[in-house]
Image: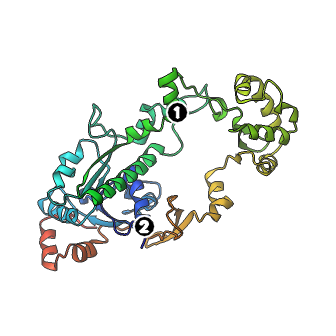
């Protein structure tokens, strides 16, 4: 069996953060039943450009592989009845909605415990289910601004800068997945479920980590650094070579000593201006221009090869294409393929979550309502008459 093959999750999810969290659980074998609102054509992720046609998009494929889909209108009594039957046979209800919405639509633990006292209700919201921003929509860009990330990112003379990836969304998905699994573990042990109140805001604040600790305890005020330099470890930053950029990092003293040999300045290893972390930090305005001149003398490859041979942390600054063709990417089986009726073979990156020796298998993202027959018939035991009745009562909305 796959690690999570005995876990069933009813996912009232949409867009990026929520689906990103549950896709890794689905990859590990969990049955993720994706509830899609027929009033809006299902998950909005199905329509994200530029690679979208009809109800299919490559964006949706990236976040929803290995899941099942059921088109269900929770605002109708019939749709709610189907949802409640799913709760009875589920382990968790997982959602990513605005903070006040789970209570409004009745998907919190108090709303559902009479159906299944062991149900875990994991809500990934923008700002949490309490607090003054509870009712505000939360998006990655907004959270990067509010939590101080953008103020930390970019060159000193440039504007505040967003990360090139939606890191609050993706980190929030991982946090929600951890919370959900912890809740299920406790519910199976104790026989009682719970709410998991997870938010993008909490995630973004939590990821401030040591700069927050430095500020809270020593008054540290972070500043943006030139060429993405580390705030205290020197050198640990991007350097420009003849034909591109590379990163060189001396996070330990031994790396600095090795670097001085590679750049043919062995005397700097014991130079009192540069010998220790503190010396190099104190004299960074002297040392870094010297290093920049040296790295500009050769190509990226001419530097990366000897630095790697000397076990100095280094890497070329790849573009996305180079990262996807990096030999280590291929060696780690990080590119996977699924077959899709519209797109044919779809290539995407694998989940980084690894459990045991067995490799995950991958199935394309579901078409909307694709799994209705199996879920309604096999799982819930509805006969054709019951399905017809529910359809007439609007449980499934306008079907694709």
Residue 98: where, in percent of width, then height?
28, 43
Residue 1: where, in percent of width, then height?
42, 73
> Which element type, helix, strand or loop, lies under badge 2?
loop
Q: Residue at x 45, y 36 (%)?
A: 144
273 sits to left or right of 160: right
Q: Quadrant of residue 29?
A: bottom left
Q: Residue at x 34, y 41 (%)?
A: 126
Residue 259: where, in percent of width, then height?
79, 40
State whether residue 345 appears in this view: no
Q: Residue at x 45, y 47 (%)?
A: 171
64 sits to left or right of 196: right
The Cα atoms of the two marked residues, 1 and 2, are separated by 33 Å
Q: Nearer the viewer, residue 307 or 16?
A: 307
Q: Which mark is residue 3?
A: 2
In this view, the residue farthest toward the bottom is 384
300 sits to left or right of 395: right
Vertical position of residue 252 compared to residue 307: above or below: above
Q: Which residue is mark 1?
A: 210
State whether residue 245 appears in this view: yes
Q: How many marks?
A: 2
Position of the C terminus by quadrant: bottom left
* Residues at discs 1 and 2 in contact (Cβ within 8 Å): no
Q: Nearer the viewer, residue 99 or 162?
A: 99
């Amino acid at each position: 069996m796959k690690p999570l093959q005995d876990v069933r999750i009813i996912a009232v999810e949409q867009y990026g953060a929520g689906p990103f969290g549950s896709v890794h659980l689905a990859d590990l074998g969990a049955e993720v039943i994706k509830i899609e609102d027929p009033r809006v054509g299902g998950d909005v992720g199905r329509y994200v450009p530029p690679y979208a046609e009809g109800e299919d998009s490559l964006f949706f494929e990236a976040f929803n592989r290995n899941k099942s889909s059921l088109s269900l209108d929770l605002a109708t009594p019939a749709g709610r009845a189907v949802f409640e039957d799913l709760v009875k046979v589920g382990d968790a209800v997982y959602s990513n909605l605005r903070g006040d919405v789970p209570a409004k639509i009745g998907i919190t633990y108090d709303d559902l415990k009479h159906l299944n006292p062991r149900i875990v209700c994991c809500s990934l919201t923008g700002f949490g289910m309490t607090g003054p921003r509870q009712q505000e929509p939360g998006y990655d860009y907004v959270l990067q601004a509010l939590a101080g990330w953008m103020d930390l990112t970019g060159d000193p003379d440039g504007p505040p800068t967003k990360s090139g990836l939606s890191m609050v969304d993706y980190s929030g998905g991982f946090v929600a997945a951890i919370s959900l699994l912890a809740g299920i573990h406790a519910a199976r042990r104790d026989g009682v479920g719970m709410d998991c109140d997870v938010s993008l805001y909490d995630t973004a604040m939590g990821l401030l980590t040591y700069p927050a600790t430095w500020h809270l305890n020593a008054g540290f005020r972070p500043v943006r650094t030139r060429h993405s330099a580390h705030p205290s470890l020197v050198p640990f930053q991007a350097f420009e070579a003849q034909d591109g950029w590379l990163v060189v990092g001396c996070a330990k003293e031994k790396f600095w000593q090795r670097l001085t040999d590679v750049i043919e300045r062995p005397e700097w290893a014991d130079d009192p201006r540069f010998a220790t972390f503190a010396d190099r930090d104190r004299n960074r305005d002297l040392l870094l221009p010297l290093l920049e001149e040296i790295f500009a003398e050769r190509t990226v490859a001419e530097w990366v090869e000897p630095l790697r041979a000397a076990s100095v942390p280094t890497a070329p600054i790849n573009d996305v294409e180079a990262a996807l063709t990096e030999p280590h990417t291929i060696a780690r089986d990080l590119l996977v393929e699924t077959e899709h009726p519209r797109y044919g073979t779809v290539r995407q990156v694998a989940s980084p979550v690894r459990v045991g020796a067995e490799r995950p298998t991958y199935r394309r993202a579901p078409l909307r309502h694709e799994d209705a027959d199996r879920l309604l018939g096999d799982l819930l035991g509805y006969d054709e008459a019951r399905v017809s009745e529910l359809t007439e009562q609007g449980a499934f909305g306008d079907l694709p």
